[in-house]
């Protein structure tokens, strides 16, 4: 199994087609059929390639500043982590998360942040569920337009401390869209 880092602007042709097929397979009816992102392009991705040179997993990563209780924090957001249905339960998701941890070492990243309905993989990888009040830009997925500001406590919010700052309860402003 090989994990490769690829910048979003380098994705075209066959890889774009394979990513789109994988995302639609994994997220079924939820995922747009005509693009390789849900709300916004990530900055880069890690892709998992098996020994047959086939794409079997991927994750988008978005680096940005957010605001936690009035203080700026540097966050690497984890977006649309998925593994092909035929390759699940083989440690690929854990391997991708391990590569993200390795990537963060020595870099200016305070937290990994994601939203998950099924938390088992992430809890096993050292993430914790938090229950902060969140603020974010609401994006109409179909029309790709901003239509407001969201405010809500998010039960799906998970973080992992990878820098020297401790996570706090309170308010987190994503200063952008919801992953």
Image (cartoon, rainbow, N blue to C red):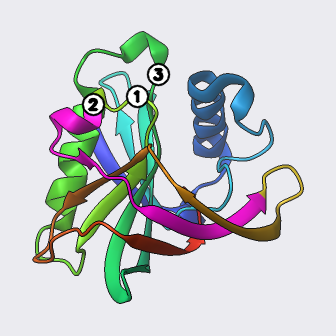
Position of 20 with respect to 90 (left or right) is: right
* Residue 177 % position (x, y): 61, 66
State the separation of the CA atoms marked 1 and 2.
8 Å
Position of 24 with respect to 135 (left or right) is: right
**From what the image shows, is residue 79 above or below residue 83?**
below
Q: Are marks 3 and 2 in contact (CB under 8 Å)?
A: no
Q: Are marks 1 and 2 in contact (CB under 8 Å)?
A: yes
User: Closest to the observer: 52 or 2?
Assistant: 2
Q: What residue is drawn where x is 44% and y is 77%?
A: 64
Quarter of the image for residue 23 reads top right
- Please name the residue that numbered disc 2 is placed on: 121
User: What secondary structure is found at the residue carrying circle 2?
Assistant: helix
Q: What residue is drawn where x is 12% and y is 68%?
A: 105
Q: Residue furthest top?
A: 86
- Please name the residue that numbered disc 3 is placed on: 84
* Residue 37 % position (x, y): 65, 50
User: What secondary structure is found at the residue carrying circle 1?
Assistant: loop
**From what the image shows, is residue 122 above or below residue 139?**
above
Quarter of the image for residue 119 reads top left
Q: Is residue 39 magenta?
A: no
**First-in-chain label (3 vs 2):** 3
Q: Is residue 136 magenta?
A: yes
Please tell me the numbered disc located at residue 167: none
User: What secondary structure is found at the residue carrying circle 3?
Assistant: loop
- Please name the residue that numbered disc 1 is placed on: 118
Mark 2: few, some, or many residues within 10 Å (few <14, many ≥20)?
A: some
Position of 173 with respect to 98 (left or right) is: right
Q: Magenta stretch?
A: 121-139
State the separation of the CA atoms marked 3 and 2.
15 Å
């Amino acid at each position: 199994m090989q994990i490769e880092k690829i910048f979003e602007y380098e994705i075209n042709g066959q890889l774009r087609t394979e990513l789109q097929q994988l995302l639609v397979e994994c997220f079924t009816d939820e995922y747009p059929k005509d693009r390789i992102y849900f709300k916004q392009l990530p900055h880069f991705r890690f892709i998992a390639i098996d020994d047959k040179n086939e794409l079997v997993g991927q994750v988008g990563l978005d680096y940005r500043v957010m605001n936690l209780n009035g203080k700026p924090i540097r966050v690497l957001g984890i977006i649309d982590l998925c593994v092909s249905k035929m390759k699940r339960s083989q440690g690929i998701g854990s391997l991708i998360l391990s590569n993200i941890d390795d990537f963060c070492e020595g870099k200016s990243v305070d937290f990994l942040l994601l939203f998950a309905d099924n938390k088992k993989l992430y809890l096993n990888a050292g993430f914790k569920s938090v229950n902060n009040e969140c603020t974010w830009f609401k994006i109409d997925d179909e029309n790709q337009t901003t239509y407001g500001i969201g405010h809500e406590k998010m039960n799906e919010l998970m973080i992992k401390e990878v820098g020297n700052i401790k996570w706090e309860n309170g308010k987190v402003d994503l200063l952008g869209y919801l992953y």
